[in-house]
Image (spheres, rainbow, N blue to C red):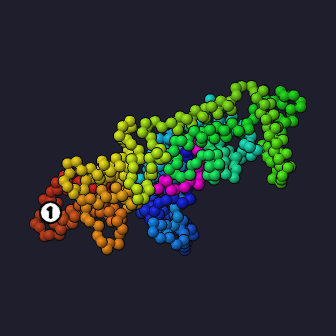
């Protein structure tokens, strides 16, 4: 389904990313002098690359972190991220896309509705009933543009590139040594106007969850595949009448279908129409003498079926953003983005998505059996200032039962609340350590280790190191 993305200006705090425990940023430095060669900072997480690019533009208010640290770019494979950074050779479904977008929002505080996509790859991994290498050998061109062969990390792929998009085909089974006839066919959108001009209004990271757009994307994918001009190696020159032999020989050369760059006006239109007529004759010539089945149309049918299978949500509570509001829009109470109350397993979502209201109810917001003013249990992972800033409801829950926000503090409200959450976990451990150290500093007749006894609660507190025993 969806794979590669690029967002040149992510709606996220660069400061929060720099402080995030999942990311380690680095830059290019001269090892001899220590001089910084490139001030752009990069960090990777499971197939996605974050870049913080310095900017000198003056900003204020909500963009103060961007003014200080720079613009954030995000690029990489959603599919590989969803598989822990290992591969992207299996099926990536609509439910997987939802899960990955939710995790990006909850983990890094990205505002999905205002993070505009600049590049997008969508396609399928398709098991063929014939060798993939036969299809690759038969490639000629797409809309007059030959398929160029490239090598990347030891495997080959074929691509026909245009100004706004590119068509990419390769053997996915060979890439990962699977020993299977696994074809990867995808369209790489280089400028989103290519989709917008076809009525597919896919613009932001949140739009990837809009199931209303999926059928149109599937039709576009099938249309591109059927538009590819393939050869039929089984058709011999001797099998065609003499008058068609020249067309067969010339048509098998990808360069024959290219429009010269120096043509203009009427001459351009005349050559383009001639090539279009000859392409129709070439296709018919091969179809009439094809020794086997109509494999291109059959493969296109398999592609359509595969796309429909991938884009059919299995979770009955799959939610479209077009109906359910925002993911992380500052100033708006967080809606139940995905309702897992029935029909779906209440699995890892409530654990990894602190902005999900169900998770707040299970963790921070739970008051059953608790005394008034009690703090409850922290969600895991602990909400950051960015998450709290994006969700006022969660911020109020965190502040409830804790020390009041101090006037005059240099920390703003969300930062102060996140600080208090960190203190909830670290203070009991630090206080206990200080008490033990105080005992050890006192002169005694016997070894303190022989007489010091900790109850189970104290042992748990002392052994807890930021949640990693």
In this rendered view, identify the residue nearer to me: 200 or 187: 200
The residue sitting at 36% across, 58% down in the picture is 392
Horizontal and vertical percent for residue 436? 19, 64
The residue sitting at 29% across, 53% down in the picture is 364
Q: Is residue 106 left or right of residue 6?
A: left
Tell whether position 285 is magenta.
no
The residue sitting at 52% across, 38% down in the picture is 311
The single residue placed furthest to the front in the displayed view is: 323
User: Callout 1: 10 Å neighbours few (<14), some, many (20+)?
Assistant: few
Horizontal and vertical percent for residue 97? 49, 44
What count of labels does the image hold? 1
Tell me which segment is drawn in magenta.
Answer: 111-124
Q: Which residue is disc 1 drawn over?
A: 447
The single residue placed furthest to the right in the displayed view is: 243
In this rendered view, identify the residue nearer to me: 390 or 278: 390
The residue sitting at 52% across, 72% down in the picture is 58
Q: Is residue 191 left or right of residue 96?
A: right
Horizontal and vertical percent for residue 298? 65, 30
User: Can residue 371 be seen in the rendering of this structure?
Assistant: yes
Locate the N terminus and report the quarter of the image it occupies. top right
**Quadrant of the rendered image containing residue 459:** bottom left
Horizontal and vertical percent for residue 387? 39, 57
User: Can residue 387 be seen in the rendering of this structure?
Assistant: no
Q: Secondary structure at mark 1?
A: loop
In this rendered view, identify the residue nearer to me: 96 or 448: 96
**Quadrant of the rendered image containing residue 238:** top right
Q: Is residue 114 left or right of residue 126?
A: left
């Amino acid at each position: 389904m969806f794979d590669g993305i690029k967002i040149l200006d992510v709606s996220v705090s660069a400061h929060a990313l720099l402080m995030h425990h999942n990311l380690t940023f680095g830059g290019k430095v001269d090892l001899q002098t220590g001089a910084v060669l490139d001030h752009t900072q990069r960090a990777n997480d499971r197939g996605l690359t974050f870049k913080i690019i310095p900017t000198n533009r003056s900003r204020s208010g909500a963009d103060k972190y961007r003014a200080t640290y720079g613009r954030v770019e995000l690029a990489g494979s959603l599919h590989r991220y969803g598989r822990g950074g290992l591969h992207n050779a299996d099926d990536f479904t609509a439910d997987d896309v939802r899960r990955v977008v939710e995790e990006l929002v909850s983990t890094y505080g990205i505002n999905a509705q205002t993070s505009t996509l600049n590049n997008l790859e969508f396609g399928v991994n398709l098991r063929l009933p014939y060798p993939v290498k036969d299809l690759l050998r038969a490639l000629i061109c797409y809309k007059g543009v030959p398929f160029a062969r490239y090598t990347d990390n030891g495997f080959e792929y074929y691509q026909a590139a245009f100004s706004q998009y590119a068509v990419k085909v390769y053997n996915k089974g060979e890439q990962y040594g699977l020993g299977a006839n696994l074809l990867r066919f995808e369209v790489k959108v280089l400028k989103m106007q290519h989709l917008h001009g076809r009525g597919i209004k896919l613009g932001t990271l949140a739009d990837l969850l809009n199931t209303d757009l999926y059928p149109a994307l599937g039709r576009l994918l099938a249309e591109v595949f059927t538009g590819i001009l393939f050869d039929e190696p089984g058709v011999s020159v001797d099998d065609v009448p003499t008058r068609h032999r020249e067309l067969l020989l010339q048509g098998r050369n990808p360069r024959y279908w290219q429009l010269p760059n120096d043509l203009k006006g009427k001459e351009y239109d005349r050559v383009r129409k001639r090539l279009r007529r000859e392409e129709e004759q070439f296709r018919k010539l091969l179809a009439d003498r094809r020794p086997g089945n109509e494999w291109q149309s059959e493969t296109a049918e398999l592609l359509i079926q595969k796309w429909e299978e991938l884009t059919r949500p299995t979770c009955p509570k799959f939610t479209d953003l077009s109906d359910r509001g925002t993911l992380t829009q500052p100033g708006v109470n967080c809606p139940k983005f995905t309702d897992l109350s029935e029909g779906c397993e209440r699995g890892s979502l409530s654990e990894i998505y602190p902005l999900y209201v169900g998770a707040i109810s299970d963790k921070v917001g739970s008051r059953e059996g608790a005394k008034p003013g009690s703090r409850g249990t922290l969600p895991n992972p602990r909400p950051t200032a960015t998450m709290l800033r994006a969700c006022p409801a969660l911020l109020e829950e965190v502040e409830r039962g804790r020390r009041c926000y101090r006037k005059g503090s240099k920390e703003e409200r969300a930062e102060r609340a996140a600080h208090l959450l960190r203190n909830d976990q670290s203070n009991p451990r630090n206080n206990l350590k200080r008490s033990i150290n105080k005992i050890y500093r006192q002169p005694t007749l016997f070894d303190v280790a022989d007489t010091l006894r900790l109850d189970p609660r104290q042992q748990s507190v002392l052994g807890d190191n930021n949640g990693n025993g």
